[in-house]
Amino acid sequence: MEAALRESEERFRKLAEASPDSIAVVANGKFIYANPKTLELLGLQSLDEIERITPMTLAPLGQRAEISELVERLGRGEQAGPFEIRTTSGPKNREYVFEASVSTTSINGMPATIFYSRDITERVELQAEVMKQDRLASVGMLAAGVAHELNNPLTSLALQTRSLLENAELFGLSESVCGELEQMDEAASRMRQIIGDLLFLARPAEKPQAHVDIAQILTSTIALLRAGSAHVPMDVEFDILPPVYGFPSKLGQVFLNVLRNAAQAVEGRPGGSISIRAERHDEFVEVAIRDNGPGMSAPHLERVATPFFSTKPQGMGLGLWISRSLMNDQGGALELASTEGEGTTVTIRIPQRASVSTRRGVDASTLFAGFGR
């Protein structure tokens, strides 16, 4: 019987030590066994170290009462199902989610509790991402329907307003009326930009990529911005840039979005300026656009490229998210760095090789008016 018991214990130990889940045994308020996965999660090297730890101190403070009650119920012979434990650790205080279960046993005639836990953080994050994408898809369908219904009457309104402005003298319109018509025209233009933002959520993928001239697209975008309302000093410096693979309209939209954000950040500020640097690397071209505006706080920087978050009173919160999505479609990247009171830098990297888009894109030529950060 002793030999059979030792064999059974050895079999359990081998199974536990090969398990990808955490398994620990507690008796008399102390750990008497922990498998390698448990030690790894706790950052320990040996069982001797965990034996000096009080088990309940490892539980999140808000769940200790719940876990104690669960163990007591099991001791009375009641059933208990799995439960979740959420805890934060690491230098960035990342939240981890564990699915845990508890069972009771007897070791050498002494009652003991076995704790099983599985790291389900990635699964929970994937589920949250799927739910987010489903919500965005629903919003996209709704937005496309609303935008379609609004676009025709809005176009008619804009054309009528522009016609009245162009023929103000013929119709004998006063200066005050012309001023109101200008405001109507500006409002119609803003509404067209908003509709364009919303239509992005339901656009099909664009045509295959081709070689494009980054310098030419940047030069055209800067000229377009200067021809508009932005009159901000710009310091421009380009390397001799190789052709890259990409969508010209998408790249133009990204540059215009970022440059317009930078111009709005520094416009009216004493000494406000924008620097634009474009340089080649082995596998990509990097464009860095920096403004010396007010910058952003760390919490705002984390959220500024998420949908429907804006630091501007009238912003839709779609511009940077759309720009980052467009760059991801092309196998590139858009990164932000900002310090409150010192300005913001947006770095755009475009690959020199072809990449294949695998997600829904946007016909950027219809949105070239640009968006707000």
Image (tube, rainbow, N blue to C red):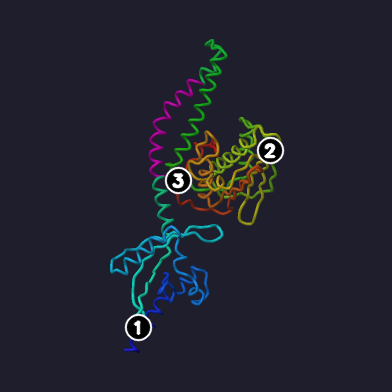
Q: Residues within 10 Å of mark 2 (few under 14, many from 20)?
A: many
In the image, 349 versus 27, the foreground residue is 27
Q: Which amino acid does label 2 sit on?
A: Ser
Secondary structure type for disc 1 = helix
Instruction: Give whichever of discs 1 and 2 has the lower sequence position.
Output: 1
Q: What residue type is labelled 3?
A: Ala
Q: Is residue 47 left or right of residue 228?
A: left
Q: How many marks?
A: 3
| CA gap, disc 3 and disc 1 | 60 Å
User: Which residue in the protein does label 2 denote?
Assistant: 273
Instruction: Give whichever of discs 2 and 3 has the lower sequence position.
Output: 3
Q: In which quarter of the image is the N terminus?
A: bottom left
Q: What residue type is labelled 1?
A: Ser
Q: In this view, does 295 lie to the left or right of 42?
A: right
What's the mark number on residue 8?
Answer: 1
State whether residue 93 is above or below residue 132: below
Q: In this view, does 232 lie to the left or right of 68?
A: right
Label 2–label 3 contact, CB within 8 A = no
Q: Residues within 10 Å of mark 1 (few under 14, many from 20)?
A: few
User: Which residue in the protein does label 3 denote?
Assistant: 205
Q: Residues within 10 Å of mark 3 (few under 14, many from 20)?
A: some
Residue drawn 35% across and 75% down?
111
User: Which percent across, then down, holds residue 370?
Assistant: 54, 36
Report the span colored magenta.
136-161
Q: Does the magenta stretch include residue 169?
A: no
Secondary structure type for disc 2 = loop
Q: Quadrant of residue 255?
A: top right
Label 1–label 2 contact, CB within 8 A = no
| CA gap, disc 1 and disc 2 | 75 Å
User: Which percent across, then down, holds residue 72?
Assistant: 34, 66
